[in-house]
Image (cartoon, rainbow, N blue to C red):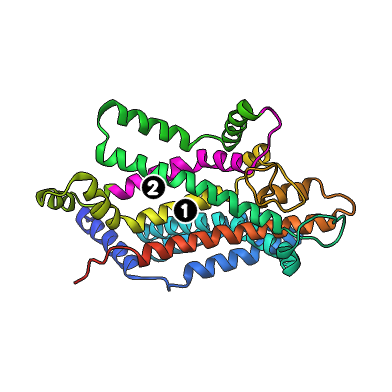
Amino acid sequence: MSLQTSPTSTGASADDATAGRSRRRLPQWASVAAFLAAALVAVLLELLGEFNIALVVIYTVVLGTVAAYVVSRVVEGRRKATDRLVTCLVVSAFGIAVVPLVALVWTVVGRGIERLDGEFFGSSLVGIVGEGGGAYHAIMGTLIITLLTTLISVPIGLMTAIYLVEYGRGRLKRSITFLVDVMTGIPSIVAGLFAYALFALFFGPGIRLGIMGAVALSVLMIPVVVRSAEEVLKLVPNELREAAYALGVPKWRTIVKVVIPTAIAGLGTGVTLAIARVVGETAPLLITVGITNGTNLDPFDSRMASLPVYAYYQLTQPGVPPEYAIDRAWTAALLLIMLVMGLNVVARLISRFFAPKTGR
């Protein structure tokens, strides 16, 4: 008499095996250990030939992900292994994305910290051929041009956003929204050419002014302000507007006294981030402002220096010997990174401290 295993008993055995694997868990450090082992193997493989840090990173990610998945599949089962696989892929993608950023910051800080001294902040390039000199004229030029850009862009951008949210209807609103979307993706060099052509019509070709740079940067900054302000104004609850209207408050006064104070934190954050967006632009300033070795604080009189253009010319036209100018270029790049980072920190602080308090 032959013994046959029933389908029910076979299915139960498979379920028991799966349940047994699902009850087993790898320690939390298992994935980290897999990646460390993969990194060790990758380093050993690269040491056999010509060492390449990029290949080490790639080998570590691939081998570590495969090892973590295989071990988890054997010990924990298919579902948990799939979860670990996706987690490893997400974390690896994040790490790969961070590597260029860290490498960039590391390189700029390492090369630019050497000239980050008092002379760099307090002197210009007048009479400087080799060693020494600074970027005082470029720093002041950047601050002046950015201030003018803000004065031009913020009122126009905020007024446009208020119109789109509070007043705009129909075809005109759709047309303005479309134009703002188009301007958001406009190349920066086109903004510079527009500003140059505009001023060349009135003052002739070859004109270079600080105000031209401000106009060019405004073309880039206005759509950023409009989009950010529009989204923030949409977040203001309609109940606040309706309550003001019920009390007989005119619409313009409701916007000034209710809507804008409620959204002031988001508006300030958006404006600050828009400034950080344009402060490092180089192409428009190359066309409209140019460069000078002396200090010019009048944006309506001849050329002005700015940090992005200063760094560009110090790197592309270093003179003889070139190492001193290249050091100044790295320091200017470091200063720009510090400026953009500072503006982002200010935006975070504005968002935190000026947000409306909802607690009782």
Does the magenta segment cover residue 220?
yes
Do tag 1 and tag 2 residues touch (Cβ < 8 Å)?
yes
Span shown in magenta: 204-233
Local crowd at mark 2 within 10 Å, few (<14), some, or many (≥20)?
many
Q: Please determine whether, in this image, residue 251 is positioned above or below residue 258.
A: above
Disc ID at residue 136: none
User: Which residue corresponds to the image point at 43% horizontal and 63% vertical from the top-left?
Assistant: 348
Magenta stretch: includes residue 31 = no
Q: Is residue 134 left or right of residue 169?
A: right
Image quarter for residue 27? bottom left
Callout 1: SS: helix
Residue ID at (30%, 38%): 164
Residue placed furthest toward the right: 320
- Amino acid type, mark 1: Leu
Q: Which x, y percent locates residue 135?
A: 72, 58
Which residue appears farthest toward the left when viewing the image?
246
Residue 50 visible at all: no
Which residue position holds label 2?
228
Q: Is residue 93 left or right of residue 232?
A: right
The relative height of residue 71 versus residue 298 in the rendered view (above or below) is below
What residue did someone put label 1 on?
273
Residue at coordinates 62% horizontally, 32% vertically from top-left? 196
Q: Quadrant of residue 115?
A: bottom right
